[in-house]
Image (cartoon, rainbow, N blue to C red):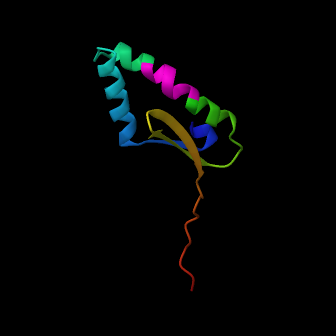
Amino acid sequence: MADRNCTFEFTDKVAELLIKISKEEHGKNATLLKRLISKEIEPCISDILLSLDSASYKIIVDVKGDEFVCRKRNQTVRKKVVGKK
């Protein structure tokens, strides 16, 4: 995502909900987690990516209730100011 100037942030609630769902589906293996991520999180991220313009964004993946949600936050690029004389 470097070419789009994006960064990602996943809250702790995301991992907790993934683990909760995986336990409910009677599994703790990587295949199940991969399937959950593909089914639940990737579509959310894809929708956000398709809506981006050329600005820099932080994409935040979080949990609301029992669902994964994504939001974008504009990242302001701060220029380093050299001391004035």
**Could you tell whether 84 is left or right of 66 in the image?**
right
Question: What residue is rendered at 37% in x and 28% in y?
Answer: 18
**Residue 72 x/y as whole percent:** 59, 45
**Compared with residue 50, is residue 56 higher up or lower down, i.e. above or below?**
below
Task: State which quarter of the image contains the C terminus.
Answer: bottom right
Question: What residue is rendered at 48% in x and 34% in y?
Answer: 68
**Could you tell whether 36 is left or right of 70 in the image?**
left
Task: State which quarter of the image contains the N terminus.
Answer: top right
Question: What residue is rendered at 67% in x and 49% in y?
Answer: 55
**Residue 37 x/y as whole percent:** 45, 23
Going by the picture, which residue comes out furthest to the right? 53
72 in magenta: no
**Residue 76 x/y as whole percent:** 60, 58
41 in magenta: yes
Going by the picture, which residue comes out furthest to the front? 65
**Residue 13 x/y as whole percent:** 37, 40
**Could you tell whether 29 is left or right of 77 in the image?**
left
Q: Considering depth in this image, is 36 or 76 the residue closer to the camera? A: 36
Going by the picture, which residue comes out furthest to the bottom? 85
Question: What residue is rendered at 29% in x and 14% in y?
Answer: 26
State the image quarter where residue 50 is shown.
top right
Please, what is the dominant secondary structure of the magenta stretch? Answer: helix
- How many marks the image carries: the answer is 0
Give the magenta-colored segment's residue range: 36-43
State the image quarter where residue 70 is shown.
top right
